[in-house]
Image (cartoon, rainbow, N blue to C red):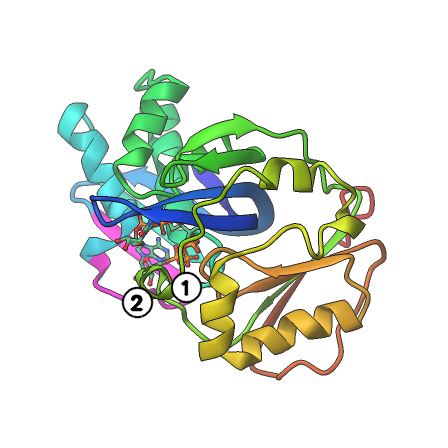
């Protein structure tokens, strides 16, 4: 069976405090983004991970796809499998691509081998694979707290807008971003801010990672400014970066970007480009 693992963007991200366990409590809104990896699982004589597309840093055997499979194999009678992953979600981009692959693989194996796992059981497995994984099990807009795995649904629908995602040629490691962010313990504003029209978000919806990451990588700040200059209602870095997204009323073709940057045009759902 084949599965399409979508990415996510963060709309606002406030880092509240560092926890005893070294993680950070945060407030953020996760929103699914129609940029996809492709997964396929096939029963085989031995387990193998077969990647294609964008090269993934690290060793194949520490890929989150294999970790997800191993987690289920330890508790369920699973055959050896070939796991094919075609990678096209930019990596180290603040898009949760690795976490998405792991969560969608849990769902795919559950379905393909009829494990009968409930949504809460899948969420519990996903939590063990990373702070961002659990979101992708239900995969709908949520206000997230805790380390990013405690959810409240939000009535946020951007389907009538055109989104543009820019991935500069910069890899930001999540741990690096958390190591440099200045926690801001006064939370509680994000849900009210995103309830306002998108055109009012510019000064009300903030990603705390931007200060440190923009200082270290000014070219990422320039992308955000360029999106606003070319008509974005709202623009922000996603998660720990390096990607920056813009929300537009109209379709745009961005000008002035470095040719090494990747650009994804995600049109509104009423007007898909074929
Ligand atoms: C920053 C966020 C925002 O959505 O996403 P990305 O920008 O990576 O997509 C997430 O918190 C990333 O979640 P995820 O990428 O799953 O993090 P994990 O693999 O669990 O942890 C990687 C490292 O990030 C740090 N970390 C992660 C989450 C968190 N709430 N506090 C942390 O301090 C820890 O140093 C941890 O060792
Ligand atoms: N299936 C995977 N796809 C992408 N990265 C993966 C995967 N499995 C493990 N990783 C590791 O996770 C790191 C973070 O990947 P990713 O989730 O794309 O970053 P971000 O959360 O910033 O968008 C990568 O540098 C890579 O070493």
Circle nearer the viewer, 2 or 1: 1
Q: Is mark 2 within 8 Å of ligand 2?
A: yes
| Quadrant of the snapshot with the C terminus | bottom right
Choose top left, top right, bottom left or bottom right for residue 116.
Answer: top left
Q: Residue at x 44, y 36 (%)?
A: 145
Label 2 vs 1, first from the N-terminus = 2
Q: Is residue 246 visible?
A: no
Residue that badge 1 annotates: 92
Q: Residue at x 54, y 80 (%)?
A: 218
In the rendered image, residue 217 lying in the magenta stretch gets the answer no
Mark 1 Cβ and ligand 2 under 8 Å apart: yes
Q: Are marks 2 and 1 in contact (CB under 8 Å)?
A: yes
Q: Where residue 98 sits in the image (x, y, percent)?
A: 37, 52
Q: What is the crowding at mark 1: few (fewer than 14 residues within 10 Å), some, or many (at least 20)? A: many
Mark 2 to mark 1: distance in Å? 9 Å
Image position, residue 44 (x, y; %): 23, 40
- Can you say whether 36 is above or below 56 in the image? above
């Amino acid at each position: 069976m084949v599965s399409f693992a979508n990415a996510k963007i963060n709309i606002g991200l406030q880092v509240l405090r560092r926890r005893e366990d070294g993680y950070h409590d945060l407030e953020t809104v996760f929103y699914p983004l129609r940029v996809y990896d492709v997964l396929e699982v096939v029963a085989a004589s031995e387990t193998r991970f077969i990647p294609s597309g964008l090269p993934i840093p690290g060793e194949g055997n520490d890929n989150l796809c294999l970790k997800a499979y191993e987690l289920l194999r330890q508790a369920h009678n699973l055959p050896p499998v070939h796991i094919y992953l075609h990678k096209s979600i930019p990596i180290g981009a603040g898009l949760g691509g690795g976490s998405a692959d792991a969560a969608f693989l849990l769902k795919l194996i559950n379905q393909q081998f009829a494990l009968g796992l409930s949504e809460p059981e899948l969420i519990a497995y996903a939590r063990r694979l990373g702070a961002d994984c659990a979101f992708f099990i239900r995969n709908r807009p949520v206000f997230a707290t805790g380390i990013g795995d405690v959810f409240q649904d939000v009535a946020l629908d951007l389907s009538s807008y055109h989104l543009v995602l820019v991935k500069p040629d910069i890899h930001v490691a999540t741990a690096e971003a958390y190591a440099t962010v200045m926690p801001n313990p006064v939370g509680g504003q994000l849900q009210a801010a995103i309830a306002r029209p998108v055109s009012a978000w510019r000064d009300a919806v903030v990603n705390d990672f931007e200060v440190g990451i923009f200082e270290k990588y000014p070219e990422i700040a320039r992308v955000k400014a360029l999106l606003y200059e070319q008509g974005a209602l709202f623009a922000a870095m996603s998660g720990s970066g390096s990607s920056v997204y813009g929300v537009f009323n109209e379709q745009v073709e961005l000008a002035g970007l470095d040719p090494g940057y990747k650009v994804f045009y995600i049109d509104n759902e009423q007007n898909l480009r074929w």
